[in-house]
Each structure stands twice: as C-alpha cells, then as structure tokens.
Amino acid sequence: MPVSTLLCYSVSFGSSHSGDLGCGAFATEADDIAQLILISGYPSSGKTQRAQQLRAFFEQKIAQAPDPRVARLKLHLINDQTLGVARNVYHTAKAEKDARAEEYSAIKRVLSRDDIVIADGMNYIKGFRYQLFCEAKAVQTPSCVVHIGTPIEKCREINKKLLADKDTDGGYVEEDFENLIFRYEEPNGMTRWDSPLFTVLDEDETPPFDQIWEAMVGSDGKTKVVRQNLATVLKPATEQNYLYELDKTTSDVLSQIQTWQKDHPGEEGGTIPLPDIGKSIELPASTTTLPQLQRIRRQFISMNRQHSLSKARVKDLFVDYLNDQFLQ
C-alpha cells in the first residue's frame, strides 16, 4: 500500500494549552470513553466504503479488547443509507436542511460516553461539523475528522458510473453533484472542530486505522476524553435576552477591530488585546474588510443561536472563532 496517508494533529493531547480549546479541553485516565468520528469528502468520493472499513476495524478492536471499558463500547454508523435519506434531498435547500437536522438528531441520540459514532453523512459544511464538535464536547467525548481526499475528477467519474448502474442506489444527478462540489468546505486541521484531522488519499487501500484508534481510544490505558467547561454546556436558548447579548457582544468585538484598524492605518496583521477575557484578537496578515468580518459574525450567530451560552462566554468563544477563521 502506498505510504501516502496524511495525518494532521492540530490538537496536542495533554499539552499545557489544553485548557484553551474553546469548546473543551482534553484529559486522560477517565472511566468512560467514547468518540465521534466524522467522515468528510466530495460526493462519490468513497466515504461510505471508508466508513464501513473503519467500522469493521473498530468492531474487531472492541471484541478483542481486554479492558472492560473498551469492550462495553457500542458502535454506531450513521449515514444517508441508515437514515433512509434519498439522494434527491440535495435538490432543494429545504429538503437538504430537513435531512441534515435528521442526521444531527440521530447522532445526538446515541452520542454518549459509552458509544462510538461514525458519522458518514452531510459533513461537507464546516458549520455543521462545528455543531457536532460542540455536541461531542458537551458529553465529554473527543472527536476527529477523516477527510477522504479523492480528486474531483475521480469523484465525477465514479458518480457517472453509479448513475449508469441500475443495480446500485445510484449516484447524484449531475446538477446536485456539481452543487455539492461547489459548496464543499474542506476540513482544516488548524481549526479546533476539524482536528485531529486524518486525510486518506484515493490510492490508499485502508485508512490509518491504528492511528485513529490511538487518537480516539488509546492503547496505553489513558483514553482521550474531554473535560466540560462553560462553553460545552449546551442548553436550549432560554436565557433572558440571550439573542440580544449574542448580537451585541459580537457586534462590539467587530467595533473594536474597526477602531484598531482606524488607529493603525496601512498596517497589516496585528494583535488586539482584550484584558476583560484575557485573550487577544490575532489579525491576519492580509487586510480584513468589514463584509468579511460581518460574514464570520453571521456564521457564529447562526451556529450558536439555539445554544444558550453563558453571557460571559459569548465574547470568549467569538474571539476563538475569529482567530480560527483568520488562520484559514
């Protein structure tokens, strides 16, 4: 097998910086273990095949595990097929949104500290991966992303063959296929919600099974789990004036950036200290425009409007989110 599997560990397990992970911090030596593994890639890239290979490997490891904490784990594979989602849902925005909500609910139902969830579905949108990342942290379980790096032209070729084969469930109609390709947001190991990131190339016969197992479960008896913090305690948005605070706080942060830019004309990059939360905004080398900042702000609000974060944490998390976006 060609040695071409790429591994990108953007989270350092047990490092001195583990307390600054935004949606949670990694720890070791817990009594309960579980994992969320997100499979992401272009349509017809072979995601389901890789997910099935990974499930078979994990099933064998669990069956042979001498550690009772590992042996009791339950494995779940969730995708369009297991949920009965037809491929034509990608033809309209509403049907796709409903199907994504169904997958989200299915994952959330089984995501616990006694389960391993392999999610091979609509993970092509980074906002959706971020939501699942936070759900995993809320139940103190680590997550990772497995990116299936099949080239677009190869995916297009496979999709045409699937469409022509009447004995299979078929591929995606051309319009939906090209739309999904266009909208795909490739995982970035520099962001918290996409790390650890494993990239599997098309020519690899198997994904990096052992590395994924080691990162998620561990073979040293010190399994990787996640401590909760205020940011991971997700609850319905019932806090009084929460949406107002979410809007106002994020708007205030953008105002601070604009003020700094006006005071430093012509400068690229820069650090804006925020003493009230003990963090800084790290501006990118290229100039950041107001429309770009507003787009990031809208994304953050959209992802958090249903999760009532404590007011003290909104600014903290928004700054983390901004800094992650600036790294891309």
Image (cartoon, grey):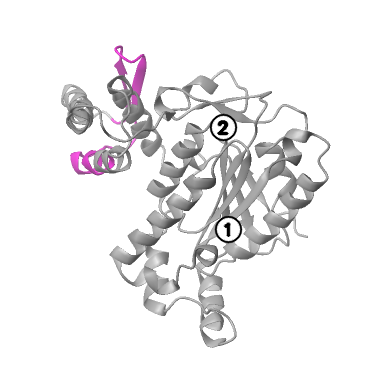
- Give the vertical position of 253 relative to 94 (above or below): above
Measured along the vertical axis of the image, is residue 147 above or below residue 292?
A: below
Q: Residue 289: x and y, percent?
A: 22, 40
- Is 203 placed left or right of 252 in the picture? right
* Residue at 32% across, 42% down: 303
Q: Amino acid at mark 2?
A: Val
Per the image, the residue denoted by label 2 is 11
Judge whether residue 283 is colored magenta: yes
Residue under the point 69% across and 23% down: 29
Q: Which mark is residue 14?
A: none
Q: Which residue is mark 1?
A: 148
Magenta region, residue range = 268-296
Q: Establish if 61 lies above or below 241.
A: below
Measured from the top left, where is residue 4 in percent x and y? 69, 54
Q: Which residue reaches farthest top? A: 275
- The reply to whether residue 48 is in sight is yes
x%, y% of residue 276?
Answer: 29, 12
Q: Compare residues 118 and 262 and report the one nearer the observer.
A: 118
- Could you say where residue 208 lies in the image, as x and y percent from the top left? 71, 50
